[in-house]
Each structure stands twice: as C-alpha cells, then as structure tokens.
Amino acid sequence: MIPFNKPYCSGREMSYMAEVCHSMTMSGNGDYTKLCHGFFEKRYGFKKCLLCTSGTDALEMCAMLCELKPGDEVIVPSYTFVSSAIAFLREGAYVRFADSGKENPNITADIIRPLINEKTRAICVVHYAGVACDMDAIMQLAAEHNLIVVEDAAHSIDAYYKERPLGSIGHLSAFSFHETKNISCGEGGMIAINDERFIRRAEILWEKGTNRAEFYRGMVNKYGWCDMGSSFLPSELNAAFLWAQLEQIEDIQSKRLHIWNAYDKGLRGQTLADGIKVMPELPEYATNNAHMYYLLCPSLAVRTRFMNYLKNNGVQTTFHYLPLHSSTYYNDKHDGRVLAECDRYGETLVRLPLFYELTDEETEKIIKLIKKYK
Ligand SMILES: *Cc1c(COP(=O)(O)O)cnc(C)c1O
C-alpha cells in the first residue's frame, strides 16, 4: 500500500536530539529554539517568532492576543481544522463561520464583508493547501473595520502572496509542524507576530504569564507574574528536530514540488471518468509550496467509489475537513446560514499521497491508476 503520508527524517534529527540530551538543557528556549526563531525571522521577515508545542497552541496565543470579550465575534472559515475555531471559542468569542469560495476552499473579502457587524473583532484566514487567500482585499476590509487578521498558516510554510511570505501579512499568524505538514517535528508550531504592539504581551503569554524574557535580556532585575499565560514553548528536543528539518528546507520543498508537478503534468487537462477534476489552478497572486495535491469529485458517492478503487489498487488517499458549522458540537450554535461551497469541498475533495520519500515509480503508478479509473 502506498500510504497517504510518511513523516520524513532528513538524517540529522537524531544527532541534534542526542546533543541536547548530553547538554542537560532540555527545557525550552535554548540554542535550538533560538536557531529556529532566527531562521524564520531572517528568511521570511516575520517581526517576532515564538515556537509553540503545536499549531493549535500558536492559534490559542493569537486568540489570547486579540483580547476578546464575551459577545465579541470572530469570522473563521468553516472548511478548516477545528483548532482555527476552538482557539477563539476558548477566549469566549462567538465564531461566525464563513463559506469557502467557488474557486478554491479559501475565504474571500466578498464572503467576509456581509458577516461583519459591530461585534466583529477579528478574521481568521486559512490559506488552504498553502494557496494564498487574496490578502490585499482582506487586509483592506479589516482596516476599514479595525479588525485583527490572524493567518492560520498551518499549510503555508514557504508559500507567497505577491512575493510576500504567507504568515507575514496578517497582524498575527500560526504555523504547524505536525507530522502531516511539509516541515515537521512530530507535534510543533509557531506564532509569528507582525504587528509590534503584540510582541511584548506575546512573550509574556509564552513565558507562562511572566516577564522572564525581559529578565533574560537584562531589562529588569527580577521577573514575576504579570499577565495570563501558559506553557506554550516546546522542549529543546523538539526544537532540535525542527532545526534539522529547517536546514533541509530547500531539499524538502524541491522534492515535494517535483512530486506535485508530476501529478499536475500527468493529470491536468486529462478527461477523468465520472467528471473528476484536478485541483483548481493557482490564483496569479499565489505561489505553490506543494503542501497538497487534491482532486474534486462531482459527488460524495463518486468520491467514495473513487477512493475505494484506489485503495483496492494499493493507494491510500484521504478526504479532508468535515464542515465545522454543521458539526455535532457547533450545529446548534451556528446561525443557520447554508454554506454550500464548504459542504461541497467537505463531500468531494480527495488528497493524493505527497511525501518526501514517494518515488517517481509510485507517482507514475498513481497517475496511471487515476487515468484508468472508469
Ligand atoms: C494542522 C492544522 C492546524 C493545527 O496544527 P497542530 O500543529 O496539529 O495543532 C490548524 N489549522 C490548520 C488549517 C491545520 O491544517
């Protein structure tokens, strides 16, 4: 069976982790954490980065920084992972779910605009499959209404919008290094803070509510409890693993792009049975970070049949998000609007295997099988 995903180890992960064990400083915010922060701040120009133990944690930090009050509202796509919504719900906000666009699962300024009311405080955008949302229009809309924009950049490492790295455009953004993402350390994440007014508080939340970061920099002579917080920072063991992956980012990305391009060359423009289509073309403002290659089926029944066909021929594929607005947890909290595009992606999207060690022969096999599907 060709699996849908297989985590990749570049080779140095184990030796860096062994070094951390021998150094006897295994808790967070050590040398490897600082190397990772520096990498992101330099390569992508994020103003301030803080590693977290997951993308979920990073989103929770973003939500805490929004300083939401009960009754405040946050606009979140329904076609996303639960964490994009839970982060804001935990802060007492109401989540108003937005439908996906017709072109791709991303939300757009036109979809967001009618959902804004006097209680709206923030917009969370998800760049689905690492394909940028149209950020100029969204940032302008947010500025008109004085809203904070959080980018859920969990899929979006090394992807760009009009030459600007994703995660550098919103006020705050969250990355994930879960094992299913391009760059991974098992479980891991990072918050990027682009608006300076949030930096000081972000450091305090990250340091469990204390001003320890300022103490370490010699700015205060003792540190203490000054705000809310939690233990958001990962151990040096995770940071060491992540650093080994970041050192290999060019190699990892070029391998993933190679596979993505092979799928696209083999499948785009072909007439596939049952009206199955390849993932939409990228908008002209977006680059491709090869996070995902997906197909769209015309119905749930076709998708089930198609996925079973691939499985019976030794290829594991997966569908993706179940719409959040109609989940058992949120169904009775949702405002009742029909989110038809989100439902469509929920029922028809299929993701193909895409991981570093997928060979050319395996990719060819998958393409051939898809073309032979009747
Ligand atoms: C993976 C993912 C997350 C959560 O990241 P974790 O690191 O698994 O906590 C959040 N949002 C989206 C869109 C994701 O794909």
Image (cartoon, rainbow, N blue to C red):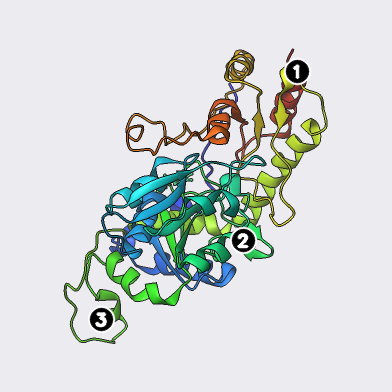
Q: Is residue 26 left or right of residue 75?
A: left
Decide which of tag 2 and tag 3 comes sooner along the chain. Answer: 2
Query: Would you name the residue on which mark 1 appears?
Result: 273
Tell me residue 25's x, y (percent): 29, 64
Q: Secondary structure at mark 1?
A: helix
Q: Residue at x 59, y 15 (%)?
A: 301
Question: In this view of the protein, which residue sits in the foreground, 235 or 155?
Answer: 155
Query: Would you name the residue on which mark 2 appears?
Result: 137
Tell me residue 58's x, y (percent): 38, 56
Query: Is residue 11 something one can see in this rendering?
Result: no
Q: Secondary structure at mark 2?
A: helix
Residue 215 is tagged as 3
Query: Is residue 203 something one can see in this rendering?
Result: yes
Is residue 78 depicted above or below 44 in this figure?
Answer: above
- Amino acid type, residue under disc 1 in the picture: Ala
- Amino acid type, residue under disc 3 in the picture: Phe
| Eye-nearest disc, 1 or 2 | 2
Q: Quadrant of the N terminus?
A: top right
Question: In this view of the protein, which residue sits in the foreground, 99 or 235?
Answer: 99
